[in-house]
Image (cartoon, rainbow, N blue to C red):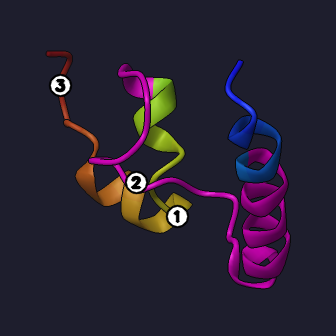
Amino acid sequence: MPPIADAVRTHAEGVMTAMSAWSTGSVLPNYAAGTGVERLAQSYEPQTLAAVRPRRPL
């Protein structure tokens, strides 16, 4: 592992901690890893999810 790896990890943890006050726990659909209904459902509030769900099976 390159010597800078520890510094990068420490810096990234600091950024995540500093930004945590603005975290909602959700993910943006275009920026999250993975696919599937359950994963995409995390991108929406329940009211919005109900509005965008298909009315019939795909």
Q: Residues within 10 Å of mark 1 (few under 14, many from 20)?
A: few
The residue positioned 46% from the left and 52% from the top of the image is: 43
Q: Which mark is residue 49?
A: 2
Answer few, some or many: residues within 10 Å of disc 3's Cα (few below 14, many 20 plus, some between 14 and 19): few
**In terms of secondary structure, where does tag 2 sit?**
helix
What's the magenta region? 9-37
Residue drawn at point x = 35 percent, y = 22 percent: 35
Residue 34 on the magenta span: yes
Position of residue 24 relative to residue 44, above or below, is below
Q: Any magenta on residue 14? A: yes
Question: Where 5 falls versus 21 (above or below)?
Answer: above
Drawn side of residue 47 relative to residue 19, left or right: left
Q: Alpha carbon of mark 3 to alpha carbon of mark 2: how far?
A: 14 Å
Q: Is residue 23 left or right of residue 14?
A: left
**Which residue is under mark 1?**
45
Question: Mark 1 or mark 3, which is nearer to you?
Answer: 1
Cα gap from disc 2 to disc 1, whole angstroms: 6 Å
Numbered circle sitting on residue 56: 3
* Amino acid type shown at disc 1: Glu
Q: Residue 40 appears at what percent x and percent y?
A: 41, 37
Q: Which amino acid is tagged 3?
A: Arg
Identity, as a three-letter code, of the amino acid under mark 2: Leu
